[in-house]
Structure formats: structure tokens, C-alpha cells
Image (tube, helix red, strand yellow):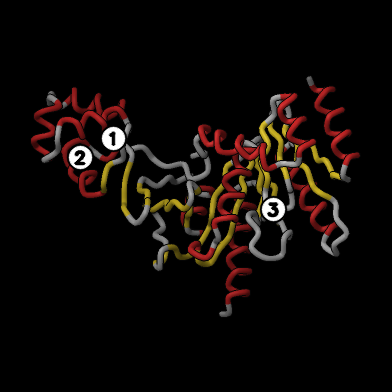
Amino acid sequence: MNTTSEFESMLENVLNILRKGGYTIHLVSYPEDRRSIDIVAKKDKDVVLIKIAIDADKIGNLEVEDLRKSSIAYSASSIIVSKTYRGRELEDDVVYVKGNINVVSPELLENYIVRKEKPLIYNVKGIYVLRLDPQKFCERRTELNLSRGELAEALGLTRKALYLYEKGETMVSLNTALQLAEFMGEDIFKKIDPLKDRVNEEDFTIIQSEKERLDKELSSIIAKYNYIGVRFKRTPVDIALKGVKTFSIVRQDDTSNAMRKIDDAEEIANLTESLLIVWKEKTGLKELEKLIKKLE
């Protein structure tokens, strides 16, 4: 099977999984190559932005960054569905991480969406880790009548490491997790929700610095009305503004793909419940400022 037909087969598989899960789906076709988002899916109020890849290693930094920023701008979940990553096939019970985006196999996605099964294990930079549920961990230690020192000694850990585990401030290696499970049971670990785990809101500080890179007139509007501006490179939407309302801005150009770009952007705006602005130089900015004023 060649790469194109393999991708199409995988894409159709993911679409079928989403349909089984009751999602409304839009396929994104702009840009033709190296786009950040292949599918926008929505169920109730939950929006999911999905990137499909045969090999997640081949997804460039720009695509990952746009996917990550899109999820923040639209308060959406984002996920990469792939067959391989870091030279190996993805395991069906492990969530991998690439640029703060969860990477999962089609099988894991189906188990989660259709069967409501959640995995326990992350693979971060090639290391298998789990996250403890601090409340359950402390309750179980109390039930077993073990002091922190006694448990640390039994597991060959320092008290400080155990303290950090109890606070949920660090993840647990797979080997340590197996030891803990023997003592305390598997239910002390938090299950992973591949779609609900969102990018840390602290990442907005990175996005805010991009105000300087936006056009001068748009920057003044952003500053005036206290909006956050996000510029994209590999999505149909060129700029997203997040504040009282979320705006999806598309620059209109004269290329042959212009209408397809606007159509895709319109679908993204509909599914994310943002307002679409087709930017025709100064006219678009005036319309944008009028809308923002109206919403104040």
C-alpha cells in the first residue's frame, strides 16, 4: 500500500470512529500540504481538532505549533492520530506526547470514543510514566497504616520523592508504578482522557507575545479591547482573536485556492462557535472593530 492510499485508509478509519461516537465532522482541505488540522469534530459543546499522520515524526514543528495554538484559541481539544512515532508502532494502551499534543493510535482512539476506555500510561520523550491520584494515594497509605518513611523504605525511594508523588507534582516511572501497584493497587493512578487533557493555560503567555508580530493596526485593536491574538501558518484561519468573543480571521487573496480556504475557515468557525471575518485589508479591520465594540 502506497503512502497516499495508506493515509486515506487511516483517515476513513478515524472518520468512522468519530461517526460511531456521534460527532459532527468537517474535513479540512486547506492548505493542500503540511496542514495542521485534518479534521474538526464536534459533539455537544466539545470541539476536537485532529491531525492525521502515518508517522508522527514527519509532522513539522509549525504544524504542531499551529495545532496547539488552535486548541487554545478555540478552547478545543487537540490530538494527533498516528501509526508510528519515534521509529516504533504506537502501543494501543499508551498516550504519546509531541510538542504538548497527545499522540494516539487509531485503536486507542476507538477504545476511548466508542468503548469509553481510558489508558493509564504516557510515553514522554521515550520514557513510560504514570500520574498518581494524590487523594487516592494518601487514602490508601492511611488505610495500610504506613508512614511516608515506611513506604519510601519499602519501595527504595526517598521521602522527598514520595512527598512529590503525594502532591501530584511529578509523574511516576513505569518500574516505580509497578512497585506501587503491588503495595496499593492500580486504582491509585489517574486514567488519561486523551481529548480532555488540554494545553496548560500558562501557554497564553507565549501567544500574547505574538501581538508584536501582527499587523500594526490589528495590534492596536487587540491592545485596545484586551484580546489575545494568535497567528497561524498552516491552517485555513490566518488569525484567531480570543476575548469576550472568539474571532476567526481569514485574509482574502487571489489564489486559486481562495474559496476552498474560506469554506474550510467557515466550517471551523461554525464548529468552534467563533465569528468569521474575511479580511479585505482595511475594510475587514473596520468590521472587526465594530463587532468588538458591539460585544463590549
Residues under numbered marks 2 and 1 in contact, where contact means CB atoms less than 8 Å apart: yes
Label 2 element class: helix
Question: Which of 17/11 is in front?
Answer: 11
Amino acid type, label 2: Leu
Where 160 falls versus 252 (above or below)?
above
Residue on which disc 1 sits: 188
Q: Residue 105: x and y, percent?
A: 48, 58
Residue on which disc 2 sits: 180
Q: CA distance from mark 2 to mark 3?
A: 44 Å
Report the residue at 48% width, 54% height from top. 103
Residue 57 seen in this snapshot: yes
Q: Residues within 10 Å of mark 2 (few under 14, many from 20)?
A: many
Residues under numbered marks 2 and 3 in contact, where contact means CB atoms less than 8 Å apart: no
Q: CA distance from mark 3 to mark 1?
A: 40 Å
Residue 161 in which image quadrant? top left
Residue on which disc 3 sits: 235
Q: Residue 261: x and y, percent?
A: 79, 55
Q: Residue 199: x and y, percent?
A: 51, 39
Q: Residues within 10 Å of mark 1 (few under 14, many from 20)?
A: many
Amino acid type, label 3: Thr
Q: Residues within 10 Å of mark 3 (few under 14, many from 20)?
A: many
